[in-house]
């Protein structure tokens, strides 16, 4: 099926079929288009779409930061639990253990951002997925 | 002596005529519309007279008149090809309710661009048609009818007004509530709040990176949608109408 790109206010905001009934400005996707709208920009002078890796990198970094923030905030309840247990002298996960996990998330975020910026193709940028690896973990001091 | 053998008084005849007109509108209009060979040209000519047009409007707005008309294929065919008659029908909620509830009437209407243009341009008519599942299906299945719908801002607004919103943060295609593999569905609008929203028939045919709803108004049998990436803040939103 032929896919067209929808241009609204100078921005590529969607895909549709050639018989779209809504009167949108429709243009052909660039060569190699794989249905990903990320990184596409509209060139009004030539009325064409082209990839802009810098814009795509910026968007991916913003998404990575959002994921890291989400996961860091999700650890808040464990910090609270560990704090209260430590105050009570009860066994269980320590505050330090959870804080180290948080730090690993920050390091993972920074590493992924560096990988995104180092990537020189859209495929390479897309391949970067946020995840904590062994390289991101911080050894707990004895 | 039996009542049947007593001649009716003039007052009784007048009362019966009044009751007939209340139920069926003008007797002359009924006779004209129900005559076997009535044509759209004759109807169009007749309704050129303001007096006859008023009679016609009263006829189609009467409960009996609207139902008799909708059940008569010859009359409906004549009516559906008359722009004046269809405009009057489309403006009457009583008439349109009868038309939408009658497969005979809907068959005549959806096959004619004159009729569908009038229906699509009337919020009253569209509301009546969209209120009946069979009438919605008829709209969906007819190219003439559907082209009239997507060509009319009024008709699209009527679809939007009855649409249901569905959201998902699934990265694989999911059916919105009520949709399934063979369910005729109209994708009305679509948006996302992060990444890219895709909709189609288990395919990424309609994608958008827009934070605000964009218009779609496309027929999709077995509508599904998904989001391109899964986080708690990435969601695909669609508005849709089940057309059966």
Image (cartoon, rainbow, N blue to C red):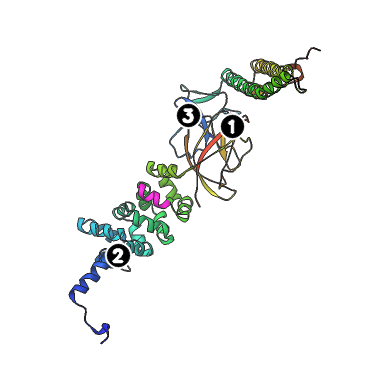
Q: Residue at x 44, y 42 (%)?
A: B160
Distance, label 2 to label 1, CA atoms, is 59 Å
Q: Is residue A66 magenta?
A: no
Residue A106 placement (x, y as % from top left): 67, 17
Callout 2: 10 Å neighbours few (<14), some, many (20+)? some
Residue under label 1, please give it: A35
Q: Chain of mark 2?
A: B
Residue B234 placement (x, y as % from top left): 58, 30
Distance, label 3 to label 2, CA atoms, is 55 Å
Can residue B26 be seen?
A: yes
- Which mark's residue is nearer the viewer, 2 or 1? 2
Where residue B56 sits, quadrant-wise, is bottom left
Helix or strand or loop: what does disc 2 sit on?
helix
Residue under label 3, please give it: A7
Where residue B177 sits, quadrant-wise, is top right
Q: Where are the magenta residues, as a range? A: B122-129
Residue B223 placement (x, y as % from top left): 56, 44
């Amino acid at each position: 099926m032929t896919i067209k790109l929808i241009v609204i206010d100078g921005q590529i905001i969607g895909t549709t079929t050639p018989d779209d009934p809504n009167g949108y400005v429709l243009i052909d996707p660039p060569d190699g288009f794989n249905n990903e709208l990320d990184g596409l920009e509209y060139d009004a002078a030539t009325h064409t779409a082209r990839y802009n890796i810098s814009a795509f990198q910026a968007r991916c970094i913003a998404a990575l930061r959002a994921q890291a923030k989400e996961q860091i905030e999700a650890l808040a309840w464990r910090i609270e639990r560990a704090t209260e247990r430590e105050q009570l002298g009860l066994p269980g996960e320590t505050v330090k253990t959870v804080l180290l996990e948080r730090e690993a998330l920050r390091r993972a975020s920074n590493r992924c951002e560096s990988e995104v910026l180092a990537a020189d193709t859209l495929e390479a940028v897309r391949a970067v997925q946020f995840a904590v690896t062994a390289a991101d973990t911080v050894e707990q001091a004895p | 002596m039996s009542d049947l053998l007593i001649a009716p008084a003039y007052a009784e005849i007048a009362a019966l005529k009044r009751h007939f007109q209340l139920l069926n509108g003008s007797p002359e209009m009924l006779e004209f519309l129900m005559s076997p060979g009535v044509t759209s040209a004759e109807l169009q000519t007749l309704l050129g007279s303001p007096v006859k047009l008023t009679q016609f409007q009263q006829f189609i707005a009467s409960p009996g008149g609207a139902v008799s008309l909708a059940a008569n294929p010859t009359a409906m065919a004549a009516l559906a090809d008359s722009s004046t008659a269809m405009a009057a029908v489309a403006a009457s909620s009583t008439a349109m309710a009868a038309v939408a509830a009658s497969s005979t009437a809907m068959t005549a209407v959806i096959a004619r661009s004159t009729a569908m243009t009038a229906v699509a341009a009337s919020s009253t008519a569209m509301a009546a048609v969209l209120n009946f599942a069979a009438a919605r299906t008829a709209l969906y299945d007819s190219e003439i009818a559907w082209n009239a719908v997507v060509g009319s801002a009024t008709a699209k607004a009527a679809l939007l007004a009855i649409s249901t919103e569905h959201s998902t943060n699934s990265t694989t295609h999911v059916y919105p509530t009520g949709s399934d593999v063979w369910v005729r569905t109209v994708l009305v609008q679509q948006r996302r709040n992060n990444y890219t929203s895709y909709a189609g028939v288990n395919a990424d045919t309609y994608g958008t990176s827009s934070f605000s709803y964009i218009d779609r108004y496309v027929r999709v049998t077995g509508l599904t949608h998904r989001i391109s990436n899964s986080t708690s803040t990435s969601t695909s939103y669609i508005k849709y109408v089940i057309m059966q």
